[in-house]
Amino acid sequence: MGAFDLTVGVMLLGLFLNTYLYGLVTYQFLIYKNTKFNDALWIKVIVALLFFTDTLHSAVAIYAGWEMCVTNYNNPAALVFVGWTIPFTAVATSVAAILTQWFLGHRVLVLTKNKIITGLIAILSTLGFIFGVYAGIRSGIINDARNFAPLSPYVICWLGFQTSADLLITFVLTYVLSRSRTGFRKTDTIINRLIRGAIQTGLFASIFALADLFSFVLHQDTNLYAMFAYPIGRIYTNTLLDTLNARRELKNNTTGTMDVDSGNTYRLQNHSQTLAGGPAMSVQSIQVQKETITDGASIDAKYSPNDSLYPPAKV
């Protein structure tokens, strides 16, 4: 292992991954912008803010790599000073997290109508944001990575609250959606797609947040935490945009006339008939009925492609 593998090397890996994820963010943002979704203004504002934050942060990340590898080339003493790029990373990540979590918290409220759970998500997300911003500003004030030990409690609170909000959102969405299956193939396909998105919502962000937390606490003499810290914000934005853009796929799956499970359903019905001069008798008849869904109209409105968990804008 080289002398700079755990300082320069791991940071560059984080920058490479961040740049790749920013490419995905840009791609998904263009899809969202070019697809005419009937979203409320506040949703469009959140998307724009996240894309702006990601663009600015990715530019800062590239500058951080340049400063470390070019400006301070052959100057190992500069590696212990964080400058302003690491504090900016903490703040930008906290902004991306709270915007995404509040948005998904609103989805939870739409599905569950439970203000207690939604309030808990908002509290966890807000606490994570506050501790994240404070930890970032404090790291800039300290500036010397060798003196980062006092930051550990704030980083633990920041990433702990942030991860808790992610996992709570994932659990609630997965639980509610899994109990909403109807038995119809096309409808369940939509619900399964939403469940997959709900799991992705918290899984990847939580993995990177916990890796960032443990590497910062346990390996403060390295830059290992930077490998996970830089991409987290892009993961949140990709999550939100994937959730929004999934409606295009769902719309394509449900548009047109289709038969549900080959179109034939068989129902066994009981009819009570009274025969002349005799007691009432129960007569069973089998009724064959062909059911079709046209333009997805029969699917529960809660899972319709255009409004799937996203009510239309009220202008």
Image (cartoon, helix red, strand yellow):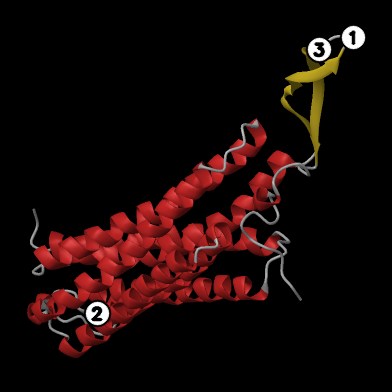
Image-based side of 274 in relation to 71, left or right: right
Q: Amino acid at mark 3?
A: Pro
- Which residue is at the front of the view, 131 or 106? 106
Residue displayed at 66% across by 52% down: 302
Image-based side of 171 in relation to 285, left or right: left
Residue located beneath label 2 in the image? 71
Question: Tag on residue 279?
Answer: 3
Measuring from the top left, give residue 116's x and y in whole percent.
44, 68
Which residue occupies the extreme front position in the image? 277
As helix, strand or loop, the secondary structure at mark 2 comes to: helix
Question: Tag on residue 277?
Answer: 1
Task: Count residues near mark 3 (Cα–Cα under 10 Å), then give few for <14, some for 14-19, many for 20+.
Answer: few
Measuring from the top left, give residue 102's x and y in whole percent.
48, 70
As helix, strand or loop, the secondary structure at mark 1 comes to: loop
Q: Earlier in the sequence, mark 2 or mark 1?
A: 2
Residue displayed at 71% across by 69% down: 313
Which quadrant: the C terminus? bottom right
